[in-house]
Image (spheres, coloured by chain):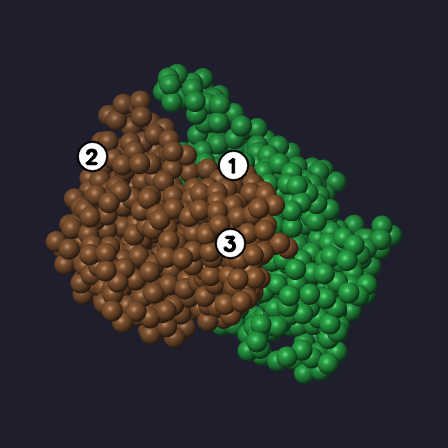
Chain colours: A green, B brown
Amino acid sequence: MSNVNEKKIGKIISISNLNVQMLLDHSEVSLRSGLCTYIGDRRVSFEVAQIAGGIAKAIPLTSVNGLKKGMDVYLLPKGIEIEYSDNILGKVFNSYGQLIDGQTIESPSTRNIYDKNLTLSEIDINGAVLWTGIKALDFFAPMQKGYKMGMLGGAGVGKTVLIKELINNVYRGWGSNSVFAGIGERSREGKELYDEMMESGLMDKLAVVFGQMGESSMARSRAAYSGLTLAEYLRDERNQDVLLFIDNIYRFVQANAEISAEIGNMPIESGYSTTLLSDVSEIEERINSTDNGSITSFQAVFIPADDITDMAVNTIMSHLDGQVVLSRKVAEKGIYPAVDVFNTTSKLLTVEGVGERHFRLAERAVAALARYQELEEVVAVLGIDELSEEDTNIFYRARKLRNYFSQPFFVSEQFTGIPGVFVKIEDVLDDVEAILTGEYDSVDESHFLFVGKIPEIKQTAIY
Amino acid sequence: MSDKIQDVISSKIDAIKSGQNVYAVGKVVRVSNYILEVAGLEDGFYFERVYIGDKAEGYITHIGKSSVTIELVKRVAAVFVGDEVTSSGKLFSAMVSTDFVGHIVDIFGEDKFTGNKFKDLVEIPAVPTNIPIMDRTTVNRPLYTGISGIDLMYPIGRGQRQLILGDKKTGKTQMGLDAIANQRGQDVVCIYVALGKTKKTVKEVYNELLNRGAMEYTIIYAAFQEDCAPMMYITPQVALSLATQFMARGSDVLVVIDDLTQHANVYREISLLAGKVPGRDAFPPDIFFAHASMLELGCQHKDGGSITILPIVETRGGDITDYVVTNIISITDGQIVTSTKFFEKGQKPAINFGLSVSRLGGQVQIPSMKKLGTSVRRELLSYLETKEIFELANIDEMSVEMRTKLLMGKEMLERMKQYRFSPLDPDGMVERFKEFAENEI
């Protein structure tokens, strides 16, 4: 049953789904210690979440079915650990650092997933601009190496597709080592991503952690820490510029809420865990760049009930350097990526960051689209003929602009039937300027939908 | 109170004297509807099946320091404080039989028509285990519903989870039944899970499927409002557990869960009665996981079998941004949203094309359907959007391009109409929509 270096430290006295209490007869147990018990040959592991006097509350890592009162509990020599070496590349781990892709690592060298913390002086905030080739992102929310970019959106508006396109454009283009943390998302999508990476021979530079939505709360919560530890290895030990893709960081908060409620902590609004702020900051503060290397992260953020004022979403947002908000209203019109330009921003979108021209054009584009929204209501009531000439121009140009920011993605060729395109920022700036100044007033708006840069449009228009 | 303790003690002593195992029995000390608190039962383990005489049975959901909490799944007679509880030494499980096909059944292996248990019952886990991520593979084989608005526009593949979402009385169940009826001869085992439906409704469903020969390959799982709430909570899990058994044997399974809104409400009820901390909208904090752990069983297994799940969810006032609704949308691989407006106008099946999505798209379509579907979807969506904006404009004053678009869109919408149980096969759909493929820009 139990292994020689596991020391018996107490007995189970109470059991519920995510909360098992133990009466301890040793004081060596501390928070986040690993414990375990045995049902026949099956080992059930726990992580200590609270200690009050001689009683510890521990969270089970797997199902508690079959657990009994009075069972002996053993202290594991280590808490949750994950491989910390070059061996992580090309491998797939579960949240607890175990390989799940059938591979093995000889002479593993592991590290606790909670260890790391950065000081103020260690953090590096400079970096070069990073173009993604996605028009709406580069234009409205430009990205810098070392940034944390959030992809926010309600259910089914295209967050995961956007993350996949970013993996395609940035990871393939950059050629740097990367980490993908799948937290609480669909297993199907996770597996498909893995298969695609294998097929295109790109797995050798990627390390993957999966704690998907069919798994326990603890697995979903810890996937975030495990993924981070892998990224930190590449940054700190290999001095690399690492890309970290997290899909989806909201699920981490959600899993913590489930655990917190079961432990009996009082919830805050919408049932989130009492420690929401510190939970998020514990993760996000580790995603930073140092003198050794950088971590650039793309994080998908689910918006529950399409409520962007949600407490968890806002907490995550406060850590981000830039955000792309995807909106259902835009998606309904069949425009993908369904970017809501009014909420999409980046700290880099300043004259100093991207230059005078880009900055001014972005301002003009947002202003035109804002006016269009107002005009849309007027048109719905009075019809287009009632608009002044200036407004009519804005109305049609803004519609073209809106269509222009749709883009065929490489990863969604199977839906659109149109091959993906990578658009250079210079082309985007030229095109936006041309649309806004009326160069394309005679071209029908449908020619702007799902294209790359505009010269292609001219050709199709003539055709 | 001291009498009660005295009672418990003396009954234990009696039990010791008569040689029974005192650790395997307990006494009910509190009854709160279908949730019992039991003293004793020291040896009980988590999720163990327990019996309260022949009055009721359930499972252990919490083991406290001095008592055990039990949720009743089945109750034939009222349970009183003081009733004896015995444990079974086994995890709560469900009974299934190979004769299930063609019948309305429950998780105990009872034929709901006759009230008798099936012969040759086999035990299966009530709560199926998650399918490891590495055992899954690409979903790419189509599962035809026979509805062109689905098969052409938002196709479903074997192993996909496609949500059917909409207000009351907009034809959601009908879409699920259409999908089941269209599996005739397709080598798919179908399971229809009726949660909290009236007996009349379930019988109607049975008759509809029977009349179309669909009961030859279909099992109907039913949990009624009069059953204990935990029964309704666990029934879809049992249905999916059975589905995983079929899948393990290489079969393709289609599970229609009608509906998950009931399931969420029932779970909320149980959890609040059990005194758990409520989360958003008073739902339990792990409501997302409750749904995800079931729907994640839908997959294409690497060994060949598959489970396709069509969960049905009811919206109120057409609001698809409700908490539970967005949760489920974020689990499934797409959604077919029904539209009250279309339903009233006779545009049936009333699919809201703008809000519906298939995340798998062309991946699960044969080439001819994929090519046609892409252009039909683009044209139709563009028409619906344009129509809204130019609702008031005079069609005669429009550009030729715009006028053709509007007229074509209208025609396309007209051809999407299909009466219930009148499926089209892929060839039929290609035939019906082929002229729109040529209008591609």
- Please give the label number shown on residue A39: none
Count of numbered tags: 3
Q: Chain of mark 2?
A: B
Q: What mark, if any, has residue B346 been given in the picture? A: 2
Q: Nearer the viewer, residue B190 or B391?
A: B190
For label 1, the SS is: helix
Q: Chain of mark 1?
A: B
Q: Residue at x 68, y 43 (%)?
A: A274
**Chain where mark 3 sits:** B
- Quarter holding the N terminus of chain B? top right
Left or right of A31? Residue B166 is left
Q: Nearer the viewer, mark 1 or mark 3?
A: 3
Q: Quadrant of residue A184?
A: bottom right
Q: State which tag comes first along the sequence, 1 or 3.
A: 3
Q: Indicate which label's residue lies in the foreground, 1 or 2.
A: 1
Q: Which mark is residue B281?
A: 1
- Relative vertical location of residue B265 with respect to residue B132 in this rendering, above or below: above
Tag 2 or tag 1, which sits nearer the N-term? 1
Q: Nearer the viewer, mark 2 or mark 3?
A: 3
Mark 1 on the same chain as mark 3: yes
A18 vs A337: above or below: below
**Which quarter of the picture shows residue A443?**
top left
Amino acid carrying mark 3 in the image: Lys
Can residue B372 be seen in the rendering of this structure?
Answer: no
Judging from the image, what secondary structure is the residue with disc 3 in?
strand
- State the separation of the CA atoms marked 2 and 3: 59 Å
Residue B208 placed where, x, y %? 16, 50
What secondary structure is marked by label 2? loop
> What mark, if any, has residue B27 been given in the picture?
3
